[in-house]
Image: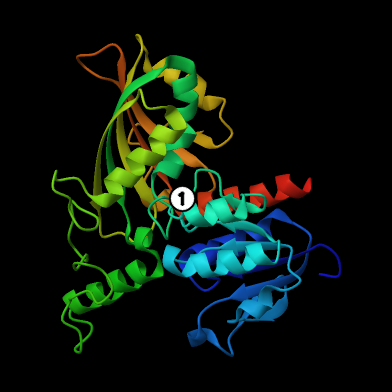
């Protein structure tokens, strides 16, 4: 690391921070120094990065002298770190969703060096499924003009970060009788998730919509335009990682599965799965592309196609964030 950038990753020990570290390592980005930053619980811990032991930092002063700061924490925590980085005139890549939630911070910083990762998550602090959806919906919208989307998102425990994964693990052990000191009740989520399917995410609103569904819809409207009608249901499933979504896409005119495949085949971020059963969420975990399959015509509508996609949103968000840095500094 004799030459290159000095990069800080805030939330380095979390699920999203770990993905960012993996993405940084995989790209070959020249890095002079890596600063993993976490809470006081990680004092004295070291993370290995490219063969070098990097001690975890916990104080804001650690940002001094860095070039880029990736923020991968919950929004409430992220705002303090973003503000510190902005004061030091550092490039900030926010993956927490905090920028969208703080107009005051955005106005104060002028956004000169404060960037949200492309298609940044609104299901803070962890990437929501819309990150993967847009890999598919954007080229289809450009090709056919999308009028309406009906989506059912199946989100794994990793959508709640490391806390969700840990909760599912502990609850599963308890329910299978492998832990005598546990009762199967989740200590970190709003409801036990092991061996169950939860048709909500967060506190339900008066109209029966969950905050997650509203945030995803807002994100998609920003990308696709307000003219697109959205009906979204978020379901949490007891799997550790990898998310899936069933999409019914109404276009401006007749469209066929063959035409859809032709468009998606040209997208570098999409992998078409020829197996008629489609891709699995487990198979998509850890991959950098969105896997799409089961592309079918709606039996009663020539302007509607049905498809299934599986992806790893955290991995996609991390890759996007690193690409942002590469583009900003003009690196190969």
Which residue is pictured at 86% across the width and 70% down the height? Answer: 2
Q: Quadrant of the N terminus?
A: bottom right
Residue 47, quarter of the rendered image: bottom right
Relative side of 2 to 301, left or right: right
Whole-percent x, y for residue 323 in the image: 65, 47
Outermost residue to the right: 2
Q: Looking at the picture, tell me which residue is in the foreground, 128 or 122.
A: 122
Residue position for label 1:
100
Whether residue 272 is visible, yes or no, is no
Residue at image location 44% in from the left, 42% down from the top: 132
User: Which SS class for mark 1?
Assistant: loop
Residue 220: where, in percent of width, then height? 40, 36
In the rendered image, the quadrant that contains the C terminus is top right
Against 93, is 215 above or below?
above
Q: Position of residue 154 (x, y in %)?
A: 29, 48
The mark tally for this picture is 1
């Amino acid at each position: 690391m004799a030459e290159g950038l000095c990069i800080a990753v805030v939330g380095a020990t979390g699920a999203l921070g770990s993905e960012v570290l993996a993405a940084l390592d995989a790209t070959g980005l020249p890095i002079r120094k890596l600063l993993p930053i976490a809470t006081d619980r990680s004092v004295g811990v070291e993370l290995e990065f490219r063969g070098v032991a990097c001690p975890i930092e916990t104080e804001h002063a650690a940002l001094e002298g860095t070039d880029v700061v990736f923020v991968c924490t919950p929004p409430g925590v992220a705002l303090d770190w973003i503000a510190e980085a902005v004061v030091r005139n550092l490039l900030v890549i926010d993956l927490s969703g905090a920028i969208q939630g703080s107009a005051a911070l955005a106005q104060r910083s002028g956004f000169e060096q404060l960037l949200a990762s492309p298609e940044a998550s609104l299901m803070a602090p962890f990437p929501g499924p819309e990150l993967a959806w847009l890999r598919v919906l954007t080229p289809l919208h450009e090709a056919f003009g999308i009028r309406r989307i009906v989506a059912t998102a199946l989100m794994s425990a990793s959508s709640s970060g490391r806390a969700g994964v840990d909760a599912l693990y502990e609850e599963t052990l308890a329910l299978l009788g492998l832990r005598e000191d546990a009762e199967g009740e989740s200590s970190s989520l709003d409801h036990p998730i092991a061996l169950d399917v939860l048709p909500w995410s967060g506190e339900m609103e008066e109209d029966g919509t969950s905050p997650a569904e509203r945030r995803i819809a807002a994100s998609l409207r920003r990308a696709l335009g307000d003219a697109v009608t959205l009906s979204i249901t978020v379901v949490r499933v007891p799997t550790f990682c990898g998310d899936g979504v069933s999409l019914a896409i109404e276009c401006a005119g007749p469209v066929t599965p063959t035409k859809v495949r032709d468009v998606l085949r040209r997208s570098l971020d999409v992998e078409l799965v020829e197996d008629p059963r489609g891709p699995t969420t487990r198979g998509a975990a850890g991959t950098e592309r969105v896997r799409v399959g089961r592309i079918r015509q709606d039996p009663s509508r020539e302007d509607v196609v049905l498809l299934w996609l599986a992806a790893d949103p955290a991995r996609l968000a991390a890759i996007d964030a690193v690409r942002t840095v590469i583009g900003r500094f003009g690196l190969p």
